[in-house]
Amino acid sequence: MTMPVGDLPLWVVLIVSALLLIGSGLTLLGAIGLLRLPTFYERIHAPTLGTSWGIGAIMLASIVYFSVAGSRPVLHEILIGVFVTLTTPVTLILLARAALHRDRAEGNPSVPDDGAQPGER
């Protein structure tokens, strides 16, 4: 049985509130960066802030709240963090490589070359 929200100690409410504000603020910052940055290559970096640090703070808030409210340690949210931490960089790399391949195939002059010498390809 979980404890009603009104019966939680003040320190728990403050910690959970602070972590939720931090997490949602970082997620909002990542979303704003996604909208404001001009190129695709700059835009793919902004959401990783929200998915890594933002979800980390929200996950910690969930762990603290449900551990105190349920009077037992709740740690299964860590799996969410592990999966997000593993999948976000892989997705970022795949998106960047696909866009880079597309832009090079189209002959876009603003895309950097691969750095290989002319005879190494």
Image (tube, rainbow, N blue to C red):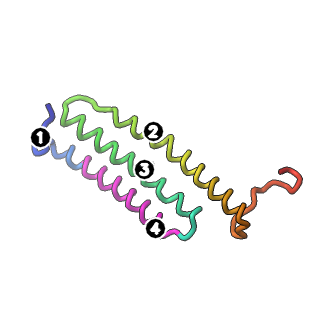
Label 2 sits on a secondary structure element that is helix
Find out whether residue 35 is within the magenta segment: yes
Residue to which mark 3 is pinned = 53
- The residue lying at 66 percent from left, 59 percent from top is 102
Give the residue at mark 4: 35
Q: Which amino acid is tagged 3?
A: Trp
Magenta residue check for 27: yes
**Earlier sequence position, callout 3 versus callout 2:** 3
Q: CA distance from mark 3 to mark 2?
A: 14 Å
Q: Which residues are magenta?
A: 15-37
Quarter of the image where the N terminus is located: top left
Q: Residues within 10 Å of mark 3 (few under 14, many from 20)?
A: some
Q: Work out whether 36 lies above or below 58.
A: below
Q: Residue at x 47, y 57 (%)?
A: 47
Name the element at disc 4.
helix
Q: In this rendering, would 113 be left or right of 52?
A: right
Disc 1: which residue: 4
